[in-house]
Image (spheres, grey):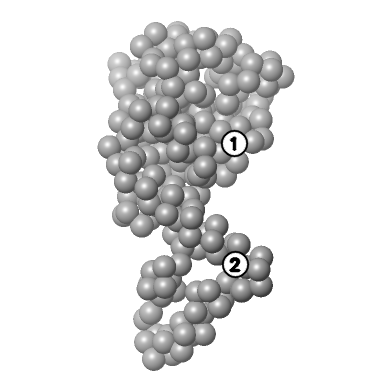
Amino acid sequence: MQHDELRQRFASLTTAHLADACVRADVPVRCAPAAVKAVVAGDRLAGRVLPARHAGSVDIFLEALHGARPGDVLVVDDGGRGDASCVGDLVVLEATAAGLAGVVIWGLHRDTVDIRAIGLPVFSMGAIPSGPLRAGTRPPDALDSATVGEWVVGAEDLVLGDDDGVLFLPAARAGELFDIAEQIRDTERGQAERMREGRSLREQVAFESYLAERSKNPGLTFREHLRSVSGAIEE
């Protein structure tokens, strides 16, 4: 999926829609930990993962950006550390000049006021005044992948972020997952509209029938029932 199509299709979706699509398609739901949030509430990003593992020096980011494509998202692995930042305003400015769609940091940032003024979406665990405290040994594969929480991601992945958080998708299955997410979105919008018109969600998903069937078949799950009535509230 090209970046323009990715951006346009994500504009009418949320990361929640796409996470539910992953469940339905039996794709691992790879969310960044909940601590990773937008520096500016309401910011959104979508793009190919541009990984960089921080070892204490800004050169890793400059090298990553040297090979970046417009629309990429710099995904910074700083090990989730909470005692020092790894990205500040100059890196974000450089990412903006390179045409990136945003920055995701498994760690902390600083220069918050300046980052907000730059306008490029940045997601991180939070801010701290301190910059890198020491430079370590850079691993030889520092530009091949990044770890975010429990997930290892790379250029074969897409990253999407909004007010619900950050989600990683396999680029090879993006078209399929977006198709499913759009179906889920449309179903949920229809359900919400009918609720506003006075038809309860329990009525729409035939909840009494589910309870009756479950009394005969205790192993029946609500998700199985929802699939039988084309419900989408849990996936």
Tell me the quarter of the picture where residue 126 sits. Answer: top right
Q: Which amino acid does label 2 sit on?
A: Arg
The residue under the point 57% across, 44% down is 164
Residue drawn at x 27%, y 37% is 172
- Locate residue 220 relative to residue 83 in the image: left or right: left
Secondary structure, mark 2, is helix
Q: Is residue 31 left or right of residue 39?
A: left
> Dot 2: within a 10 Å radius of its alpha carbon, few (fewer than 14), some, or many (20 or more) residues?
some
What element does badge 1 sit on?
strand
Q: Residue furthest front?
A: 197
The image shows residue 28, relative to residue 9, as above or below, that is below
Give the Cα distance between marks 2 and 1.
32 Å
Position of residue 177 measured from the top left corner of the image (x, y, whole percent):
36, 46
x then y, percent, for residue 91: 54, 13
Amino acid carrying mark 1 in the image: Lys
Q: Name the residue under label 2.
A: 194
Q: Are marks 2 and 1 in contact (CB under 8 Å)?
A: no
| Front residue of 190 and 161 | 190
Looking at the image, the residue that sits furthest to the left is 172
Query: Please, is residue 187 above or below residue 52 in the view?
Result: below
Whether residue 184 is visible, yes or no, is: yes
Q: Relative to 70, does residue 80 appear above or below in the rendering? A: below
- Taking depth in this image into account, of 164 and 17 the one nearest to the observer is 17
Q: How crowded is mark 1: few (under 14 residues within 10 Å), some or many (20 or more)?
A: many
> In this view of the protein, which residue sits in the foreground, 30 or 177?
177
x then y, percent, for residue 79: 47, 30
On residue 37, the disc is 1
Residue 1 location in percent, x, y? 33, 32
Total marks in image = 2
Mark toward the start of the polypeptide (2 vs 1): 1
Q: Residue at x 60, y 16 (%)?
A: 88
Q: Residue at x 47, y 11 (%)?
A: 98
